[in-house]
Amino acid sequence: MIKIFDITKYPCPILFVKAKILLENLKSGQKVILRFKGKEAAKSLPKTLKEDGFKVTNFLLKEKEIVEIEVLKKKKLKI
């Protein structure tokens, strides 16, 4: 079962901070759904998460400005 993190009550830029805090606690390879709102966040949050080592595997527009993205924490490579 995939966990859903609902951060729709937080405005930008607080939702970015909340998202990072929630996602940092994931185990490598774990997948969750992140629910948030805002057109600007829908454009920039997935990009920011990718830069931070996460993979956005799905993007859904649910209701008025409510977006759900499926996020996977990438496994770290062993050297």
Image (cartoon, rainbow, N blue to C red):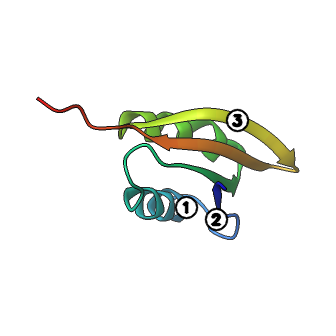
Q: Earlier in the sequence, mark 2 or mark 1?
A: 2
| Observer-nearest of 63 and 13 | 63
Q: Nearer the viewer, mark 2 or mark 1?
A: 2
| Observer-nearest of 57 and 78 | 78
- Crowd class of label 1 (few under 14; some 14 to 19; many from 20; radius 10 Å): some
Task: State how far apart marks 3 and 2 are (Cα).
Answer: 16 Å
Q: Are marks 2 and 1 in contact (CB under 8 Å)?
A: yes
- Crowd class of label 3 (few under 14; some 14 to 19; many from 20; radius 10 Å): some
- Crowd class of label 2 (few under 14; some 14 to 19; many from 20; radius 10 Å): some
Amino acid at dot 1: Leu
Q: Which mark is residue 45?
A: none
Q: Secondary structure at mark 2?
A: loop
Question: Which residue is the site of mark 2?
Answer: 7
Where, quadrant-wise, is the N terminus in this rendering?
A: bottom right
Q: Which mark is residue 59?
A: 3
Residue, x 61% and y 46% (percent of image)? 41
Q: Position of residue 20 (x, y in %)?
A: 43, 57
Amino acid at dot 2: Ile
Say above or below: 62 vs 11: above
Residue 75 lies in what quarter of the image? top left
Instruction: Report the residue that reaches farthest toward the front.
Output: 1
Q: Position of residue 16 (x, y in %)?
A: 49, 56
Residue 57 lies in what quarter of the image? top right
Question: Which residue is the site of mark 1?
Answer: 15
Residue, x 39% and y 62% (percent of image)? 25
Q: Are marks 3 and 2 in contact (CB under 8 Å)?
A: no
Say above or below: 46 vs 12: above
Whether residue 57 sits left or right of residue 22 in the image: it is right
Instruction: Report the residue that reaches farthest toward the bottom.
Output: 9
Q: Secondary structure at mark 3?
A: strand
Q: Earlier in the sequence, mark 1 or mark 3?
A: 1
